[in-house]
Image: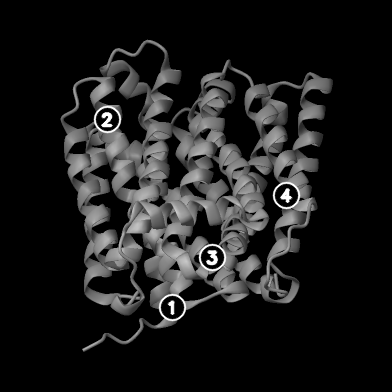
C-alpha cells in the first residue's frame, strides 16, 4: 500500500533537516580549528580550514553519483544509503590520527551527505515546479537557518567539554534522526514506472542537455559564485572574529545572531516570489549585495578605521551576506531545474555538483589567503557577487513565463 504524502508542514521540516546535514557538518567544526591545529601539529591554523572545504568538495562530487542513482533506484534508498555512509565516515573521523586521515574521513562524509542534499531537491521537484517549488525551498531554507545559528555553539561546547572529536558523535546522532524520519514517514516520490536504468550513455546525454541549455548554465554559474562567497565567509569566519575582532569565546554567539537575523530571508522570499517571480528577486538581491559590499570595502580602506570602529558595520554586512542566499539559492535552483523535470535526479546532481565544486574551488584560496585583515574576504565577495549579478542581467528565460 502506497503511503499518503506527508502534511505540507512536516514535509517542509523534513526537507530542512536533510538540507541542514551539510550546514551542521561544516559550521559545528569552526570553533575547533585551534584545537585541531594543535592536536594534529598543523602549525598554520589556516590549514584547519581544509576540514570544511574538503567536506564541501566531497558533497559536490558525491552529487554526481547520488542524483543519477536516485533516478534509477528511487529517492529514498539513495538518501538512506548516503546517510549510512555519512555515519560510518564520522566513526572513521573520531579515530583519525593525522590531518590526512581526517581529511579523507571528511571527504567521505561529504560523499555520504551529498545524497540528502541533492536527492531531496529532486524529491521536491517530483512534487512541485516553478514558483511553488521555489516557495517550498524558501520555507525549508528558513528552518534550515536555525542549524547554522546553533552549530558553532554546539561545536564550541562539545570541544570544550569532551574534545573536538566529540563533534562527530553529534553528527552521527543528527544523521540517525534524519535517517529514521525519512525512512519511517516519507513516501517514495519517484515511482518504479518513471525510473531509468543507470547507463553512462544516459548520463552523458543528460550532461549534454544541461551543458547546452543557456538557462541552466547561466544559473549554475551564478550559483557557483554565490556558493564561493558563502563558503569563503564560513571558512574564514572563526579567524576573522577571533584574530581581527578579538571575540574569543563569543564567536558562536555572533555567528548565531547573524544566522538568526538572516533567517527571515526565506519567509520573505516565499511570500514575494509568487508575486514578483524568481528571477527578479534574485537579481535585485545580488545587485544590492554588490553595491553594499563595494561601499563597505571603500569605506574600510579609504577611512583607515580601526577594527573596533568598523565591527558593527561588519556585523551588519555579515547579516546581509547570509540574507542574500535566502533570496537567491532556492530561486536559482528552481530556475535551473525548471526545464529539467524529465531528468530531475541527474539534473539536480549535475547542477548541485558543479555549483558546489566550483564554489569550493573559489573559496579555498580566499580562506587560505587570510592574513589578519578583511581584504581577501571582501575582495572575493566583490568579485563573486558582481559576477553573479552580471549573469542575472543577461536575463536568460526558460519556458516558464512565471519565472
Q: Are marks 2 and 4 in contact (CB under 8 Å)?
A: no
Please say whether residue 15 is visible from this viewpoint.
yes
Q: Where is mark 2, residue-wise?
A: 104
The label nearer to you, 4 versus 1, is: 4
Look at the picture and state if 330 lies above or below 222.
below
Mark 1 or mark 2: name the one nearer the start of the chain. 1
Residue 158 relative to residue 323: left or right: left
Q: Which residue is mark 4?
A: 286
Q: Nearer the viewer, residue 97 or 35?
A: 97
Q: Which mark is residue 9?
A: 1
Q: Earlier in the sequence, mark 4 or mark 3?
A: 4
In this figure, which residue is indicated by the disc labeled 3? Answer: 340
- Measured from the top left, where is residue 305 in percent x and y? 76, 22
Q: Earlier in the sequence, mark 2 or mark 3?
A: 2
List x then y, in percent, for residue 299.
Answer: 81, 28
Q: Quadrant of residue 70?
A: bottom left
Helix or strand or loop: what does disc 3 sit on? helix
Q: Nearer the viewer, mark 2 or mark 4?
A: 2
As measured in the structure, the alpha-carbon distance from the residue carrying label 1 to the one carrying label 2 is 37 Å
Residue visible at 46% across and 65% down?
344
Mark 3 surroundings: few (<14), some (14-19) or many (≥20) residues within 10 A: many
* The label number, if any, that marks residue 234 in the structure image: none
x 77%, y 56%: residue: 284
Q: Secondary structure at mark 1?
A: helix
- Say if mark 2 contacts mark 3, CB within 8 Å: no
Q: Nearer the viewer, residue 76 or 71?
A: 71
Q: 282 or 294: which is nearer to us?
A: 282
Left or right of 382, for residue 4: left
Q: Mark 3 or mark 1: which comes first in sequence?
A: 1
Amino acid at each position: 500500500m502506497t503511503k499518503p504524502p506527508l502534511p505540507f508542514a512536516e514535509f517542509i521540516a523534513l526537507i530542512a533537516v536533510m538540507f541542514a546535514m551539510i550546514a551542521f557538518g561544516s559550521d559545528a567544526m569552526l570553533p575547533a580549528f585551534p584545537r585541531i591545529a594543535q592536536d594534529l601539529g598543523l602549525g598554520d591554523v589556516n590549514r584547519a580550514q581544509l576540514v570544511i572545504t574538503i567536506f564541501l568538495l566531497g558533497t559536490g562530487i558525491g552529487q554526481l553519483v547520488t542524483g543519477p542513482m536516485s533516478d534509477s533506484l528511487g529517492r529514498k534508498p539513495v538518501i538512506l544509503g548516503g546517510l549510512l555512509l555519512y555515519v560510518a565516515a564520522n566513526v572513521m573521523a573520531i579515530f583519525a590520527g593525522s590531518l590526512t586521515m581526517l581529511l579523507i574521513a571528511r571527504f567521505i562524509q561529504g560523499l555520504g551527505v551529498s545524497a540528502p542534499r541533492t536527492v531531496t531537491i529532486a524529491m521536491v521537484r517530483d512534487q512541485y515546479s516553478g514558483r511553488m517549488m521555489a516557495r517550498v525551498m524558501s520555507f525549508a531554507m528558513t528552518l534550515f537557518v536555525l542549524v547554522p545559528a546553533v552549530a558553532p555553539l554546539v561545536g564550541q561546547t562539545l570541544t570544550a567539554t569532551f574534545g573536538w572529536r566529540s563533534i562527530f558523535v553529534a553528527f552521527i546522532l543528527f544523521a540517525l534522526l534524519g535517517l529514521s524520519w525519512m525512512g519511517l514517514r516519507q513516501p517514495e516520490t519517484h515511482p518504479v514506472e518513471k525510473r531509468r536504468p543507470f547507463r553512462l550513455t544516459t548520463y552523458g546525454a543528460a550532461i549534454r542537455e544541461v551543458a547546452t541549455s543557456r538557462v541552466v548554465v547561466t544559473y549554475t554559474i551564478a550559483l557557483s559564485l554565490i556558493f564561493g562567497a558563502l563558503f569563503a565567509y564560513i571558512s574564514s569566519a572563526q579567524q576573522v572574529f577571533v584574530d581581527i575582532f578579538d571575540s574569543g569565546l563569543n564567536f558562536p554567539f555572533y555567528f548565531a545572531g547573524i544566522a538568526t537575523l538572516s533567517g527571515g530571508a526565506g519567509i520573505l522570499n516565499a511570500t514575494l516570489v509568487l508575486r514578483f517571480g524568481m528571477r527578479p528577486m534574485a537579481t535585485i538581491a545580488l545587485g544590492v549585495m554588490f553595491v553594499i559590499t563595494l561601499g563597505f570595502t571603500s569605506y574600510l580602506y579609504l577611512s583607515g578605521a580601526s577594527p573596533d570602529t568598523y565591527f558593527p558595520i561588519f556585523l551588519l554586512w555579515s547579516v546581509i551576506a547570509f540574507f542574500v542566499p535566502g533570496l537567491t539559492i532556492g530561486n536559482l535552483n528552481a530556475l535551473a531545474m525548471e526545464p529539467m523535470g524529465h531528468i530531475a535526479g541527474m539534473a539536480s546532481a549535475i547542477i548541485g555538483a558543479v555549483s558546489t565544486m566550483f564554489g569550493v574551488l573559489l573559496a579555498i584560496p580566499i580562506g587560505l589567503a587570510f592574513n589578519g585583515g578583511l581584504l581577501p574576504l571582501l575582495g572575493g565577495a566583490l568579485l563573486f557577487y558582481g559576477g553573479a549579478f552580471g549573469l542575472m542581467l543577461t536575463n536568460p528565460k526558460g519556458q516558464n513565463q512565471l519565472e
